[in-house]
Structure formats: structure tokens, C-alpha cells
Image (cartoon, rainbow, N blue to C red):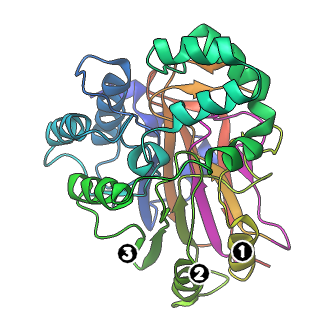
Amino acid sequence: MSANGDRPENRTPKRVQEDGAPLLSFQVITDTHVTSDPNHVYNRNLERALRDIADNAPASRGIMHAGDVTDHGFPDEYAEFRRIREGFKGRLPEIRFTTGNHDVGSGVWEERLARFLEAAGASAASREARDLGIIDEKAELRRVWDDFKGRLAEIRLAMGSYDVEPGVWEERLARYLEATGTSSAYHDAWIGGYHFIFLGTEEADDLFCSLSARQLDWLDAKLGEDASPEKPAFVFLHQPLKNTVAGSAEAQGWYGVMQDEELKAVLSRHRQAILFTGHTHWELGAANTFRAADERLPAMLNAASVAYLWTDDDERKEGSQGYYVDVYPGSVLVRGRDFASGTWVEGATFRIEYPVE
């Protein structure tokens, strides 16, 4: 535990302390990308994040994980995740999960990307990428990817021509559900009188999220339960909606809901909701980390990443971040947390007022 003078409550802005004890507190993490190597930086970052929560949030009612629990969805990666979580047994609240593309995608996204790039005239880089095991951090593939990052929608359509083998979705989803203890691809829970809703893809796509009409109708109904403009409902989805939060601009390419307009239509009827997403890894405090509610859509927040971060300069950055959330009468306070340094993220404190007008 941190020394008393360095405890987070002693670094909280004075106006937050004046609110008194919150009605409900929870944390939001995403993109942990656990690997099979216990010493990998991603694994160590998850351990650090969970230790931060265990030390500083004893009253937490839950940790909400917005997807990409593992790096590839492999059994040994889930085993390593379970080992890390068990190391904090009795010290943490329940962790609830959404599916990420790395968890339940078909697992051949990199191969499809290489095929597309080869067809587009990047054959040399594609061959090298295959020879290197299709590791996207490699410099040459990174360069090629940067050349095409503004064309992700086109890439997605091209990749779609390669059919996923029968049974892949069922196998990947079953493994994820068993490892995380989650009941289904999408689910909900009431915690302390507040509704928590977890959306999830229903296809083994390697990049995008696909929501069935049934799931969208389910969301509409769930958001209508005990609904009030004065009472927030918390929604979690891995991929952000296009042109909303950090990293989701069409040119940036990291939006990823196939039913983008349909989901926006549902959310427009329930502006008391707050949507948390991951996927982009964009660091907290960047432009559009928080998208305030307007006359059309509810509030939305990008939750960064525990494994590593991305910047507005379109560059990877080592780091590990997430949110502490406190619910008060008439408002929700969201504070960005730097798990690596154990401090609050400057410029990433957001207060969402209720009732929604």
C-alpha cells in the first residue's frame, strides 16, 4: 500500500472530497492483452493495475473490463490471466467482462491483412510479415500498416471475403466464457441499484464488432428498465462508435461496430446512459477522451488500455491506464488513473451531471 501522503484520496481535487462518500464506486479497465509469459510487460501491467485497485479502492463494487482480456485468446493466456486474478483473491471485487476482438476473433486477422496488402501492391512487406510470424510490431509491417490506416473500412470488406471456418466462433466464445466466468456474449447486472450492461460481438471477426438485431432490441429494453433522466446506466462495449471518442475518427480507423448507426439509434433514446469503450488504446487526456452527452447521444468515454497506450501523434507509448468511477446524487465522477505511476491522469477528470436534459 502507498504511503499515507501518496494515497489517492489525498490527491483528489478538493471539490470532489466535498461530495462526501459516493453512493457507488467501481473501476473500468480494458485491453489487458495478457500473454502466456508471466514476465511479459502486459502481464506485469495487469498485476500493477489490480494491485492499485486492491490497495486504494476497498469499497469498490466491481471492476468492469471492456475487452481484449488476452492477446490471442489462447488457452495458456487465459490460464495466465486466471493466475494473476487469483493472486488477488479476497482483495478485489468481482470482475465483469465484455468480449474483445483479440478474445473471440477468428485468430487469423494478421494473415488476412497481409493478403490484402499483398493484393494492394505491398507484396514484399507482406511476405516479410508472414516470414516474421505476422507480428504487427515489426517495423516493416508497421510502416505498411501506417500507409493503409486510413482505409480500415476497405480492409475490413476485403478481409470479409475469407470465410471463417465453421465452429471457430463457437470455440472461441466458449473458451472466453469459461475463462472469465461470463454467462453469454452479452449480459447485464444490477449493482447497488444501478444497471450495468455489457455488449458483445456475435461473430468471430478479427477487428469489428457485430451486434444482432436481437441484441440491439435487448439493449433497448434493458436501458428502459427502471429508467430515469436522473439515474445513469452504465454500458460497456469493446469497440467505439465511429467519430465519437479518441481514436474512433474515420481517418484514424479504430472505430469498429458494424451496426454503428443502429446502435446510435438505440442509445439516442436513452441519453442517461454512459458508454465506456476500449480497443483504440488512446491515452487518457488526449483529445476526445470524453464525449459529453448532447441532444442526440449519451456520454461516452475511451478507457485507454492497461497493456500499452496510443497517442494523438499516432504512435505507440508504454503505459497503463484506466478509470475510477464514483456515483453521487446528481452526478457521476470519472477519474483517469495511471496505474504505472499510481497517480491521477492530468486532464482526465470528468463530471457527468444528472438529470439529463
Residue 11 visible in image? no
Q: Earlier in the sequence, mark 3 or mark 1?
A: 3
Q: CA distance from mark 2 to mark 1?
A: 9 Å
Q: Earlier in the sequence, mark 3 or mark 2?
A: 3
Tag 2's secondary structure?
helix
Q: Is residue 289 magenta?
A: yes
Q: Dot 1 corresponds to which residue? A: 262
> Taking 124 as reference, is 147 left or right?
right
Residue 189's mark? 3
Q: Position of residue 45 (x, y in %)?
A: 37, 26
Q: Dot 2 corresponds to which residue? A: 213
Residue shown at the point (83%, 67%) measured from the top left = 294
* Residue 39, picture quadrant: top left
Residue 259 visible in image? yes
Asked whether disc 2 touches disc 1, contact meaning CB atoms under 8 Å apart, the reply is yes
Local packing at callout 2 (Cα closer than 10 Å; few below 14, some 14-19, many 20+) is few
Q: Amino acid at mark 2?
A: Ala
